Every structure is written in structure tokens, then in C-alpha cells.
Amino acid sequence: MTSEPPILTVRGLDVDIAGSRILTGVGFDVPASGVTALLGRNGVGKTTTIRAILGLLPDGGRVTAGRVTLAGEDITAEPTHRTVRRGIGYAPEDRGVFAGLTVAENLALAERPGHVHHYDLVHDLFPELAARRGQRAGTLSGGQQQMVAIARTLLNDNILVVVDEPTKGLAPRVVTEATEVLERAAERVPLLLVEQNLAVVRRLARSAVVLDAGQVVHTGDARELLADTARTTALLGVGSHSSKGAA
Amino acid sequence: MDTLVLLTLTGLGLGALYFLIASGLALIFGLMDVLNFAHGAFLTVACYTAWRTAETVGGVPGLLLAAVVGTATGLALAVVVELVLIRRLYGRVREQILVTVGLSLAVPALVQTVWGADARTFPVPDALSGTVGVLGARVPVNRFLLIAVALLVLFGVRLFLSRTRYGLIVRAGVEDRAMVTALGIDVTRAFTLVFALGGALAGLAGVLGGIYFGSLSPHQGTSLLVFAFVVVIIGGLVSITSVALSALSVGLVQQYANYYAGGYGDLAVVFLLAAVVLTRPAGGTGSPLLRLRRALAAHRTQAAGGTA
Ligand SMILES: Nc1ncnc2c1ncn2[C@@H]1O[C@H](COP(=O)(O)OP(=O)(O)OP(=O)(O)O)[C@@H](O)[C@H]1O
Ligand SMILES: [Mg+2]
């Protein structure tokens, strides 16, 4: 592939929450193009990794060691809003949609001053959102809320988009729609994607990082990993317990 | 009939005063989880600076200038308190409560050493000290002033919240502060802004309180604050209009009960509060009590983790 430097590097990241160690020495690269999947069973620390990168750990959580760089610059101890302004779009696990605000207001809030705002792209990808501009986001379906969350990440010219379990709890048809949107998004911007649906990973991801018990246990080509059923089962526990469905 | 009219308009005037104090409290608590016990102290100091101004200048110009000075005093105090104290204590709910309670005790004591413990007369110009006949009742003019100002403020705050980018940030921040920062927005600026706005409204309430009661004392703000908290708990954090409606009910209930139930207005307010709290369905982001409980619980696990 390319010899481009990675857009995001994570090195030796230790994270404690409420006094217990959640991540130990987590390190990986996110290439400057394509989709990187962050995989692992429930509770292994995928969301915590994302939150640590963004400086969004919950109360009582902190990074005790390690370094994160974005486009070559250290962002480890930086306040979240500054890191995000460097050009990150983030759609969190719970979607982070403001229920009391309208669709239009949710999008307007994501507008980064001094940027071009790609409403044409957003309305092209999500014609439904254009039609529901004035609707309160809290009254949207789960799939529509996920569209708002993803739309917010594509509104500005970002250098990295981070999406945490976008297909969680969605009906199969909506999962397909979301996957198509992410595929198109990945043509424009590198994606770091947390995803448990392996069909989605297979279709989108170029590289994969697998976590287990707060540590990176595998990094490499995503399709190679998924082709190796024994390996996938060992690392992700697929088959031994289902991790899908609405939690 | 005339008594009822007088009681109603007086209750509305009092409700207007509660609204000015409670709207700031609700915005500050909703956005920042800060229970600002110092809010009454802002009001008291503003009332004194307004009083000095009104005394010095005199007449209607004096009162107008006093309103400006009082509002500015509340605003300045709030900004200083936010930048110097509250900002360092984000997420530490208990410490914040201690600091603001400390201020709420220290400031009136300070006011007392400077201007004495006795109540002072607030100079009200003739234009505002008379009464008007309404359906046979003689209603003090200042009641209408209070109601009009409160309506203007309600209108202004609603415009601010619904039409400006900062208003949007505040509404979003009340729902989910962390997500606002995750969109690249520096939410601490909105904190300072909301604190300043709350302080300015408390200052304005100090001036209007001086006119309404015709007097001022070092503990004026503290006693009004108690009712403002009740207003916030009843009104919730969902909208500024619900705070206004809640303020209005508290003001009216207090006035009616004071007259018809032998001076038990304060007790009636407590009953109203209990009735609302006990019958309201639990849950929802709008409930201040729930929010506070959650904030304290988060604080507790954090503290436990720190010592483990
Ligand atoms: N606020 C918190 N307080 C205490 N423990 C937490 C907190 N947040 C996460 N943890 C713990 O950290 C570990 C990792 O959680 P995390 O949410 O990162 O997992 P995940 O891989 O994203 O799981 P899932 O696939 O279920 O989303 C879990 O054991 C979880 O219980
Ligand atoms: Mg997760």
C-alpha cells in the first residue's frame, strides 16, 4: 500500500477509570486513508480507547501513560474541543444526538466556524434528514438518529472520522444503508470504526486492530483476519457468544 | 374582588422577582450542574450598589442609573466568581456547593460590616410609589413595573436561547455537555456567559426587589434565593417558560395563602413544592433533583476510586 504516514498514532496508552486499570499499553496506527476497524468482544475497552484519544474519558477516568498523535502532533493531554477542531468528526456509541434540538440544530451545532459546510453532501447521503429538518431529534427512529450522528461527522472537512458501533441496534436493512454511507464517507476521509458486525467490517475495513482485556492482541489486514475463521473465533469469540442485537 | 385583584397583582410582581432570580439559577444548574448558593449574594450586593446610586443621583434618572449599576454589579460579581472559583471546581459538585454556600454567608456579613445590619429605605421616585385603580383595587404601580420587566426578560432570554449560536450551545449543553465539546465547541465560554447572564438578572432582581419591598437589608438576597430554588425545582430545567410559570405559581400561592390562610404563605409554598415533587413522574433530564443526585453519585464513585 502507500508509504503515507499514519493520520493517528496511539502508543503505550494506559487508562484508569475509578481506580481500576482499563487499558494497558494500547498502541496502533490509523492509516491516512481507508477504514481501520477496532474490534473486540464486549467490555474489552474499545469505547474507552476512542474516548481516551479524544480526551472524553468519564469522570474518574484518566490517561496514566502513553501518547497519541494526530497528523504528527501530540494531542495526548489536549482539551477535547481543541483536538476535535484539528479535524475530527466523532459519532459516539450512544449517537450523542441532542434529543431536544431539531435535526437542523443538531447539524448547525456541528458547523465548525471558518470551515466549508458540506450540506450538499449530507443531504445527498441522507435525503431523509433534509425532509426532517424541523423535527426534534429525540423523536427520530434509532436509524435516523444514527444518520444525524454520521451527518455531523461529514459536515466539515475532517482529517479523521471516528465512529463507535454505528450499526448497533439497527434493523438489517438500516445496517446496509449505514454501511453504504460509511463506504462513501471512507472515499473522502480515513475512518476509525468500532464495529461488532463482521459482515460490515468485511465490507468496509482495510486494516484491523483487535483488543482483548484492555490490550491490543492483533493488528493487521482486516480481510486476512476475517478469512481465518479459527483466528477470528479465538480473538473475537464469534460463535461462542453473540455480541449483536440491541443491548 | 378588589382584594383578590390586589393579591393577584402583588403575587405576580413577587413571581416576577422570583423569575429573575430563578432563570439564572436554572440556566447555571442546567448547563454546569452548579448549584449556585451565591446567587442571592450577587443580588444583595447589587441592591446596595443600586441603593447608593439612587440615593446619590435621585429621582427617576437616579433609579434608571441604579438599575444599570445594579445589573452591572451582579454581572461583574458573577464573572469574577466563575473565573476565579467555579472554573477550578468543575465536576466537583460538593466543593462547588461548599464554595457557593461560603460566599452566601460571607458576602452578607461583609455587606453588614460596610452598611450596617439595619434595613435601609430604598428611594423610590414618586412616579413609581403611587397606586393605580384596577377593578376597584388600589394596586401599587411598581407591581406593573416588575411584571413588565420580567416579561421583557422572558422574551429576551427565549430569543437568546432560540436564535443565537450561544443559545444553541447552551440548550445542547444542558442535555449533554461532553457531546458539545466533542463537536469542537469550547463549552467553558458558554459557562462564563451563562454565569454572567444569571448574575446580571440577579442584579436586576436586586434593584427591583429594592423597589418592591421599598427597603433593603444584608439578607435580602438569601431569603429570596430560597424561593428561587423552589421555583427551579418545580419548574424543572427544560424551558425558561416553565421556570416563568413556576415562579408565577409560587408568587401567587404565597400571596393568597398569606392573606386567606392566616399568614402561612411560606408554608403553602413548601406544600406546593412537596406536592409537585411527590406527584411528578421520576426521570427525565428536566428534573433538577435527579440531576443533582446523579452528579453527586458520579462524584462519589470518583472519590472512592481516588482512594482505592
Ligand atoms: N464510567 C466507567 N466507570 C467504570 N468502569 C467503566 C466506565 N466506563 C467503562 N468502564 C469499564 O471499562 C471496560 C471497557 O469498557 P468499554 O466501554 O471501553 O468497552 P467496549 O469494548 O466499548 O464494550 P462494548 O462492545 O460493550 O461497547 C469495561 O469493563 C467497563 O466496565
Ligand atoms: Mg463500546
Image: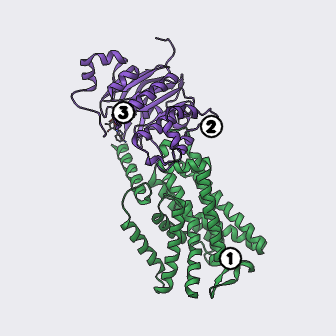
Q: Residue at x 56, y 60 (%)?
A: B24
**SS of the residue under disc 1:** loop
Tell me the crowding category of disc 2: few under 14, some 14 to 19, or many 20 or more residues within 10 angstroms, Cα based: few
Tell me where residue B72 sits by quadrant.
Answer: bottom right
Residue identified by numbered label 3: A173
**SS of the residue under disc 2:** loop
Q: Quadrant of the C terminus of chain B?
A: top left
The amino acid beneath tag 1 is Phe
Q: Which residue sits furthest left?
A: A240
Chain that is green in the image: B
Residue identified by numbered label 2: A113
Q: Report the mark closest to the observer, 1 or 3.
A: 3
The image position of residue B48, as x and y in percent, is: 66, 69
The image position of residue A2, as x and y in percent, is: 49, 12
Q: Earlier in the sequence, mark 3 or mark 2?
A: 2
Q: Residue at x 62, y 54 (%)?
A: B160
The image position of residue A197, as x and y in percent, is: 33, 29
